[in-house]
Amino acid sequence: MGKNLVGNHIRKLRFNHDEMTQQQLADKVGVTRQTIVALEKGNYSPSLELAFRIAHAFNLPLEEVFFYGENTK
């Protein structure tokens, strides 16, 4: 069985939302820019609360921002 990871579309969504910077998103959801960097690189899986805050920042349902599966790259 392969390693399962949480993947996301954050980078694409930021650029589709007026080219939002990592810092702007971080400020909006209450984390550091480094947290957003780690999320985008797939080095960090967010807490459920943070995942919802990020989805809310983009006005999207959770499953349109995050996905779960073996092939996240």
Image: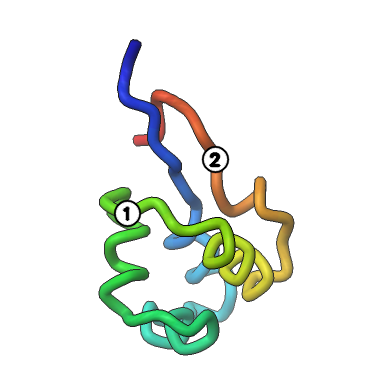
CA gap between label 1 and label 2 equals 13 Å
Is residue 62 or residue 18 the one in the foreground?
62
Say which residue label 2 marks: 67
> Along the horizontal axis of the image, is 65 left or right of 25?
right
Quadrant holding the C terminus: top left
Looking at the image, is 19 positioned above or below residue 69?
A: below
Q: Where, by quadrant of the figure, is residue 4 drawn?
A: top left
Residue 53's spot in the image, x, y percent? 60, 71
Picture coordinates of residue 35 (x, y %)? 32, 70
How busy is the neighbourhood of tag 1: few (under 14 within 10 Å), some, or many (20 plus)? some
The residue under the point 26% across, 51% down is: 43
Could you say whether the residue bearing mark 2 is in a helix, strand or loop?
strand
* Quarter holding residue 55: bottom right
Q: In this view, does 67 lie to the left or right of 41?
A: right
Q: Position of residue 72 (x, y in %)?
A: 40, 34
Q: Is residue 61 above or below residue 17?
A: above
Identify the residue shown where x is 36% and y is 59%: 39
Look at the numbered disc 1 and give the secondary structure of its residue.
loop
Scheme of colours in the image: rainbow
Crowd rating for badge 2 (residues with CA inside 10 Å; few <14, some 14–19, many 20+):
some
Lower position in the chain sequence, tag 1 or tag 2: 1
* Residue 65: percent from left, percent from top: 59, 53
Res 55 label: none
Q: Using the image, tell me which numbered label, if any, was put on residue 44.
A: 1
Query: In front here: 57 or 30?
Result: 30
Kindly identify the amino acid type of the residue bearing the numbered disc 1. Answer: Tyr
